[in-house]
Amino acid sequence: MKNITKKVAVAALLLLPVLAFAQSVPSPTVPTTGVRSLDDVSRIITTLVEWITGLFFVAAILFLFYAAYLYLGAAGDPERLTKAKDQLIYSIVAIVVALLAGSIRFIVESVLR
């Protein structure tokens, strides 16, 4: 009796994974990709420009912090102060360019439509 119970238990454990495979899983729908119209091209370019503008803006802010670090670390040295001020001007120009890049995107989109 004990031997039969062990065999039935082992058989049940071996057949248990088969029950899991009996459940059918619907195949997921794969989204179609690719360019199908001019709107798709516009959407891709818009997304790309938004990402690049965002990265450029973050880099400009980091350079602004670097300019502040140089300015605070100059300790009255005229040469280091000049370098810090130049870096500050460059970073402000970069921020302005990053902000203008977003508006240029809207101008180009309006011309293309």
Image (cartoon, rainbow, N blue to C red):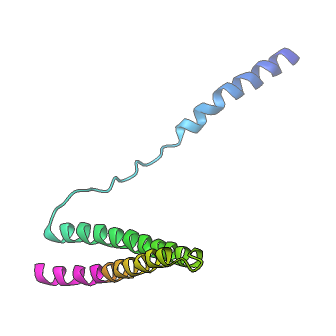
36 left or right, relative to 49: left
Quadrant containing the C terminus in the rendered view: bottom left
Q: Is residue 99 above or below residue 43?
A: below
Quarter of the image holding residue 8?
A: top right
- The residue furthest left is 112
- The residue furthest right is 2
Quarter of the image holding residue 102?
A: bottom left
Report the front residue among 54 and 76: 76
Prevailing SS of the magenta stretch: helix
Report the front residue among 33 and 44: 44
Q: Is residue 45 above or below residue 23?
A: below
**What residue sits 40% from the left and 48% below the top?**
27
**Could one spot residue 1 in this view of the protein?**
no
Q: Position of residue 82 (x, y in %)?
A: 44, 78
**What residue sits 76% from the left and 18% below the top?**
7
Q: Position of residue 3 (x, y in %)?
A: 84, 15
Number of callouts in the render? 0
Quarter of the image holding residue 58?
A: bottom left
Report the front residue among 37 and 59: 59
In this picture, which residue range is highlighted in magenta? 100-113
On whether residue 105 falls in the magenta region, the answer is yes
42 left or right, relative to 81: left
